[in-house]
Image (tube, helix red, strand yellow):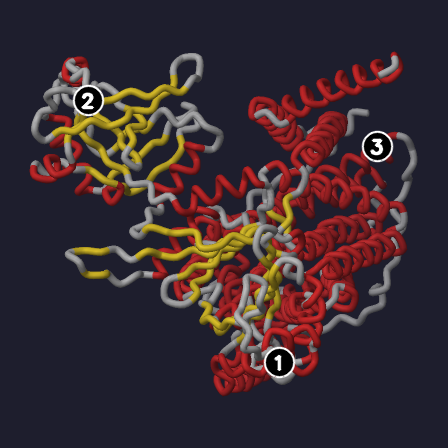
Amino acid sequence: MNSSSLFLAAEDSSSSAVFNALYGFFSSPFFIFVAGLVLLGLFFWYLASDKDKVKRNIGTFFILGISTFSIASLLTNSIRYGIDIKGGTSFTLRVVPNIIDGMEQPIDMDKACTAIQERLDASGTNEVSVMAQGKDKILIQVPVTEDAEVDALRDNVTRIAKLELLKVHPNSDVILSDVDPETRRPRAVPTGFRVMKHVFEDDQGKKHESDLVIERRSNAQSQEVYITGKDIASANPDYQNKGHVNVSLSTSGAYKMKKLTSSMQLGRDRLAVVLDDKVVSAPVVQNTLYKEFSISGLDGKGEAENLSKILSNPLTNKLEVLGEQKVSASLGLSALEQGEMSGIIGLLFVFAFVYVYYRFAGIVAMMGLAINAIVLLGIMSLFGFVLTLPGIAGIVLTLGIAVDANVLIYERMREEREQGRSFGTALRNSFEKAFSAIFDSNITSLLTALILFWLASGSIKGFAVTTSVGVLTSMIGALIVTRVLFYWADRFGVMKDAKFLNLFKNLKTVDFMGKARIVTISTISVLVLCAGYAAYKGEGCLGIDFTGGSSLSYNIPLGKEDLLKYQDVDAAVSQLRGSLSKAATVQEFTNPAKSNTIQIRCANEQDAKLVEDYLKKNVSGVKAFYAETDAPKDADSLEPPSRETVSALLGETFFNTAIWALAAGMFGIMMYLALRYEWSFAIGALVSTLHDIVAVILLVIVFGMELNIIHISAFLTIAGYSINDTIIIYDRIRERLRVAPEDEPIKDIMNEAINSTLSRTLLTSLCTLAVIACLFFFGGPAMRDFSATMMIGVIVGTYSSIFIASPVVLACSKKHNLRKEVQAAHVATVPSSSADE
């Protein structure tokens, strides 16, 4: 190696060291914690300040800080992709039946699948798929491909985590010191005790093993002090003490713990925490324990978190790994490219629209949306949220809906300028008047998301998390970023006035309230007809994600991968879409050491047979799997495809928790709106949102789509969109009620409020529909059902905000004096007019 190459190697090494040091610092919990505190402090300082100059300066530092933090997170953590985009790993597990008294016990497959799902995806953000296959097999798919992660995941899944709490003999050291030199075993272990391995770390972090004399299980059982994993109520990692897990016992477990420790000599006797027949810790008992205790000595990376999940979701049966394969991206590379392209086209349309309609203010809105997107992706990368193709569509849609806040502010600004106020005053007043509507609409979405996360499971939890992040970043973009940019534009004289188009200026005032009765009758009639059609179709409305079905698998040996291509099978199955009772899905599994497998999931045996026959006739490589020969078969011989029954991805438990979570979310929204707007508004919002969810579900069925897992997030997004739209109108009605003369009918006040917000409603709906239309036309088959459902939802949500939500409030107001209630609840506030420039 010459001198120059030595210099380059040294330089590369130095650069690598610097990069690793920076990477370690920016990804450390300490940096994240401190940066989070600083940003939170700036955020609240911004909200608390009444002075324009302070808001401008603090807001600027906040924007720069959170943007830098988000970009650093993206560079150090990157984005995790789901199986539909990147592929992952698949495990086939066998559930081993328990043998009691020589009799094989029945296997509870639902319980086993639920325990595994919660172990791997307690937060619902990891996009884990768990399906029962046959009577004793479980198929798991996870978006993980790195060997180290796969090994850890395999251990996490199959580990039973048999926990026992047993007494350590008080003279353990003395007993172990008296060793027979020939057998190297203790000479005299007391009856009822046994010798077990104790694994621990010293102060330098080195692992050690020693022996302890531990009470036998049978002895503890006879004394009713045998505590096991079945006695655990909950287990959570202790984030203040590294390597510790805090455990809460059930009532029976707490009774046994109290009985056990009350007989021990405090400050001397020890209690062994035994996990899978190894002592992980043996602390001295300092107090009589009851319901709470801690497990220590879990110092490996993620060990405390994994053990918490395992203890909280114990397996009652042993699991055996029958196979492990790499999984192809379920939607393929073309679907990802189509999704990205449709998203870019949609966002370009939004940017073009806001620029043409709002001129310079449109550029400010675009910058706010760009920072919104950076922060959203940065937070997703920071917390390791998995991004799927529907997730990409959801982000694009979130940004499209985020335009609504800007539209709301700009429409207020237009009104202020039309009343002759200066640009600075109009700017300040528009943000202050729009704040309550933006805040209330986003808080209700956030409240629903938090309730869904608390009560629901699986993919609904994941939706709740991403919705929460989207709500927060949208509020930051609309209320802070755009306002600060306007402040600076005004400060440097870049923007002296706000000139907007006004396509709805000459729009005739419509008597919406006068048409309420006709609209109600027609709406109920349409819903009844749609419900009748859905009842007629029955289970035919549901896709295989909900019903399960039958799988058809072709195993391709090594060296013959070119015989049958995933793309050919997928294209052939797509041709059968109209002939099958339900749409089928195709996936490819690869095992570098064994074989590849192409699996087709169908609704039933009849569909599987139809697919098999069609592939035989139309895909040349498939015919080789049915070649009949009398020659002996070797390892490379092609076997006919195997068929197995597969369970639904979304079972009864999922339905129950989803319904309860959604009901709780609706109740939470009612309570919030009742406190902020009075009960009439809360009832109107509830009725209109329930109408939207039911109407969209029924219309999806009427238009011939099957309800699958991809529709779940669409329905939940629609509920949030509907609430958002409704609250904007409610905020204007409440504003008018506060100042309206006593003799002005409430009906006229509501008509005026709806008409004054109609331009915002139509602009937002058209803008959102344009984004979704791009997903529908350019997003490929993978996005078609999702985007079609969203288009229906936006139209229905806009309709209900105008024709259902407000008429329900009007009907309720006839029972009491709504005007007086609103005016009594209103506390007059004087907007700040300080501009200390």
Q: Quadrant of the N terminus?
A: top right
Q: Nearer the viewer, residue 362 or 610?
A: 610
The span from disc 2 to disc 1 (Cα, nearest Å) is: 76 Å
Q: Residue at x 78, y 43 (%)?
A: 370
Residue 670 locus on image (x, y percent): 47, 57
Q: Quadrant of the C terminus?
A: top right
Q: Residue 824, can we see it?
A: no
Q: Nearer the viewer, residue 635 or 472?
A: 635
Q: Is residue 674 above or below residue 218?
A: below
Q: Which secondary structure lies at badge 3?
A: helix
Asked whether the beta carbons under mark 1 and mark 3 sit within 8 Å of each other, the answer is no
Q: Earlier in the sequence, mark 1 or mark 3?
A: 3
**For residue 6, side relative to residue 469 (left or right):** right
**Residue type, label 2:** Thr
The span from disc 1 to disc 3 (Cα, nearest Å) is: 52 Å
Find disc 2 in the rendering and name its residue: 183
Q: Residue at x 80, y 54 (%)?
A: 344
The 10 Å Cα crowd at callout 2, few under 14, some 14 to 19, many 20 or more, is few
Q: Nearer the viewer, residue 523 or 195?
A: 195
Find disc 1 in the rendering and name its residue: 704
**Residue type, label 1:** Gly
Q: Residue at x 26, y 63 (%)?
A: 106
Viewer-nearest of labels 1 and 3?
Answer: 1
> Which mark identifies residue 687?
none
Q: Residue at x 22, y 22 (%)?
A: 212
Q: Earlier in the sequence, mark 2 or mark 1?
A: 2
Q: Is residue 185 above or below residue 448?
A: above
The span from disc 3 to disc 2 (Cα, nearest Å) is: 84 Å
Find disc 3 in the rendering and name its residue: 488
Viewer-nearest of labels 2 and 1?
Answer: 2
